[in-house]
Image: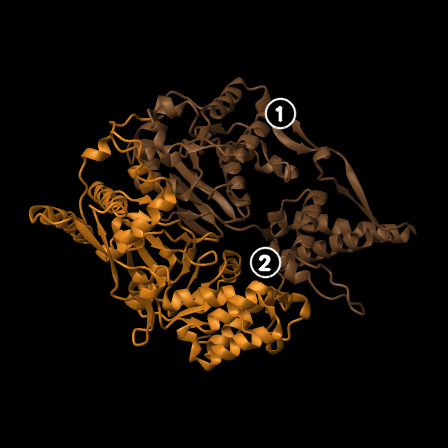
Chain colours: A orange, B brown
Amino acid sequence: MAKKSPKKSSTTAPAALSKQDVKTLNSLRGLADEVVRSAERGRTPSLDIPSRSLSNVRYNKSKRFIEMGSGTNRRELFNLSQAKSYMQTLLVGSGCKQLLEQGKTTSIRGLYYLLKHTIEGSREETFDDQADCDPIIEDVEVSLDALREELHVYASNRGSMVGNILLNDSGDEIDCTRMGSGGYSIPSIVEPEIIKFAKCDAKFVLHVEKDTVWRRFNEDKFWQQYNCILTHGSGQPPRGVRRLLNRLHNELGLPVYCLLDNDPWGYYIYSVIKQGSINLAYESRRMAIPNARYIGLRSKDFTACGLSPSVTIRLNEQDVRRAKQIKTYPWFVNKKPWQQEIDLMLKNGFKLEVEALISKDISYVTEQYVPERLEEQDFLD
Amino acid sequence: MAKKSPKKSSTTAPAALSKQDVKTLNSLRGLADEVVRSAERGRTPSLDIPSRSLSNVRYNKSKRFIEMGSGTNRRELFNLSQAKSYMQTLLVGSGCKQLLEQGKTTSIRGLYYLLKHTIEGSREETFDDQADCDPIIEDVEVSLDALREELHVYASNRGSMVGNILLNDSGDEIDCTRMGSGGYSIPSIVEPEIIKFAKCDAKFVLHVEKDTVWRRFNEDKFWQQYNCILTHGSGQPPRGVRRLLNRLHNELGLPVYCLLDNDPWGYYIYSVIKQGSINLAYESRRMAIPNARYIGLRSKDFTACGLSPSVTIRLNEQDVRRAKQIKTYPWFVNKKPWQQEIDLMLKNGFKLEVEALISKDISYVTEQYVPERLEEQDFLD
């Protein structure tokens, strides 16, 4: 049954490189060339890493997403406090180069294991643990202006999709109208080299927070009736889902509606989809969807939908703190509807999950709530 | 864009019932008939709920899985301490009946919202929170000998599949050889009414613990080369994945190999796949796979594969405690290889993740480790 393969074939066989791979490889080589140039000039090899601290992150009002400023931190080889991270940065770069050349991808955990070893002639580890390695991966991303996925490193894969779209994923044709009850599992790397949009009849994307709600919409064939694409991201959507939504929006011109809970966590998910996150500000350009719309539960829905007090959930201290914080986000602070929304939630003293609508009827959300919101264009921006 | 649907259509339109649905509905009606019979005889309405306590769970040596004993707890309507849970049980039963009749499914969270309300003329809630409702769902499952999925209630959906198998999922043909990099997302309800096996050329199932490892196998087209089905369950596999593995094993006769980490958590995942879990002992019959094999990392692999100390992870106190506990499980206690395996891990003082093999080569696990274990039939049972 088990065929024996030649050992270590993977390290020797060079992979066919895509155009994007060639570009990323060139950036990686540029990183190494800098070291050589410095040495030749008799200078201390150093790297200027864009700073990922809060002080170097700002909301760009015209682009309408969070982006990084121009601040950088210098990392030098001949500096006791910087030598290790300097070497780690080059090590991560060489690991990514290996992945690209082999035409393989791995997780951040995999890259950590690929690079972890005891430095010869010492008792020093290249990385003590994963927490040592992760920020360095981000440093390399931001230095090269390359998404993690372009470096062949992927995040975990959560989230599914169905709807009126035909994809090509790694050479396989994926018809998202015929994916049964499970749906197409959205991979973590969805760059155009891997996922190509073949044909799309859908008119918009409905992104829901949870797989359980997604299932209701899929079971009711909502995407068929309303000619859309249906996605979920198992809570805060992982990078692959965010990037795919971004591509569906920008390349196919599809509006993106987000059906999220009426709680600070739902607001925050919306904020990340729309404006990007502070931690990963350097990715906003390819992840953020400033035109995304919030079609999720609203504080007014308790009255508007005539919900029972039974289905409300009291806000806890953390909820209140988070809500007040989100209220001051620069992209919410000047938006009256959002200020009113958050104020009313605080006044209500409770939050509402999308599932609370089940108390009206099991399919209220698919047959009434979302259709009415869409028809009346009643959403928050 | 948004078409308006008739309101509340779902509650009125009766669904076409499958054979299984008719059977489940009959069981639910039986539950209600008992109440009527008791009333007619002038007796206290009561339910005998099979006990799910540890003392009523045992390992069946001939069936080789964990099963429930015959102990039951009586729940009476006219008993102050039991009245609430008695009524909750019938309420959950009526909720499931509604789902079945409407031909809809929901999550345990959805069912909770469906049933939660303030009892008329009182300030009493049917359920105070989800934790109140979940055990009652289990009570109904076990009383009716119906899987949660047969009651139209589903768990969350994690896990993907690719490989040489053609399915029919809710009328859609799913070709698992053409699922790209993302794979087919395994739904939480995989009963034969929903998922039918159309054609299967695969010779075995390789179930891996994590999506990141699964991706390595998919990228290397392992399932093509070794003619198998590749699944993962994002850690402890959810019910849908366990049930699907069980069906692939029992209905198609496919051996199931589990590639898990060399740590107590990996051992425990194996134990649950193979023998079932104590909490859900009543499901073992349809979930457990007593012939599943452990092809995961072993304590001997540190030496056997020549791994570097860099990639080991020191056992913490909890690991040691769990390992000692698992060693005493009745299905491991008489198996010398398992005793040696766990003893060696304790002696090593460290654990090993599957990803640690990346330190040998990025595709060592797909090109060497698993093929060799399969060829030599070198696994734990």
Q: Is residue B375 visible?
A: no
Residue A184, x across and y down, in percent: 40, 53
* Nearest the eye: B117 or A203: B117
Q: Which residue is mark 2?
A: B104
Residue B152, x across and y down, in percent: 61, 52
* Nearest the eye: A122 or B213: A122
Give the number of the disc on residue B330.
1
Indicate the secondary structure of the residue bearing disc 2.
Answer: loop
Q: Amino acid at mark 2?
A: Lys
Query: Relative to B179, is A167 above or below?
Result: below
* Nearest the eye: A267 or A296: A267
Query: Relative to A345, is B295 above or below?
Result: above
Mark 1 nearby-residue class (10 Å; few <14, some 14–19, many ≥20): some
Q: Quick one: quadrant of the N terminus of chain A?
A: top left
Q: Please report the residue visible at 43 percent of the width from the left and 26 percent of the height from the top.
A: B298
Query: Relative to A127, is B43 above or below?
Result: below
